[in-house]
Image (cartoon, rainbow, N blue to C red):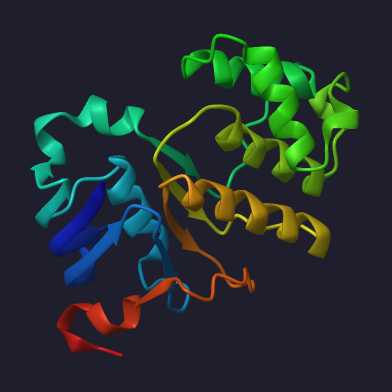
Amino acid sequence: MSVFAGSHLTCIRGERAVFAALDFAVDAGGALVLVGPNGSGKSSLLRLMAGLLRPAAGLLTWNGDTLDDEPDVHRGRLHYVGHLDAVKPVLTVLENVAFWAGLRGQRDADGAARQALDAFGVGRLADVPARFLSAGQKRRVTLARIAAAPAPLWLLDEPTTALDAAAVGLLRDAIARHRAGGGLVVVSTHAELGLDDAATLSLDDFAAGGAR
């Protein structure tokens, strides 16, 4: 059973302490929703979790092992979706997702990509060059990448950006399937995803210096 946790985490950006003494834990099948106003550190925390930033203090662990011991192993166990859509305009929709699936070790990359695109309602666009996609379609393709190759930990930073209600529902379904298989999800979102049983972490509670 996987457990992803952080203890006494402090994040400093541009000489400013964003949050301090922050603790969290997510078990297999669990979800953690990050809340707080803009600038409270939600994106910074997700980047710490992804290994893209290093904490100024504190530890991140996976099953009790410190992530600093094997950072490449940790990067291989997660999918991170940030604010930007990782879609190459010169490739088709299928080529974009299949490239990612193959990079993450899927033997049948095309098959996995098609299945993931169908799950996010953009399978009909498989042969369309990505430069012709709308903002919402690009977001769906970006999210399809995380469904095209298995990884136990999903880190999602405002994943509903540019999505309509139907696409948000497909994302909710994908998260539910991932969790049912023992996956872990940490998400920052202003939208209602319907993760009623998810734990909530308010970044306001860890504002540096106790400021609210």
Q: Residue at x 23, y 52 (%)?
A: 3
Q: Position of residue 183 (x, y in %)?
A: 42, 47
Residue positioned 37% across, 73% down in the render: 40
**Is 63 left or right of 124, judged from the image as shown?**
left
Q: Position of residue 176 (x, y in %)?
A: 57, 55
Task: Identify the residue at image location x=56%, y=53%.
Answer: 175
In the rendered view, would you say 122 is above or below 156? Answer: above
- Seen in the image, is 82 located left or right of residue 120? left
Instruction: Compare residues 47 and 120 and report the one nearer the observer.
Output: 120
Q: Quadrant of the C terminus?
A: bottom left
Residue 164 picture quarter: bottom right
Say if residue 171 shows up in the picture: yes
Marks counted in the figure total 0
Front-most of residues 100 and 84? 100
The picture quadrant where one finds residue 116 is top right
- Return the x and y of residue 94 as percentages of the image width and height: 76, 20
Quadrant of the image occupied by residue 107:
top right
Q: Is residue 181 above or below residue 162?
A: above
The foreground one among 51 and 77 is 77
Does residue 149 lie above or below 209 as drawn? above
In-image side of 121 versus 65 (left or right): right
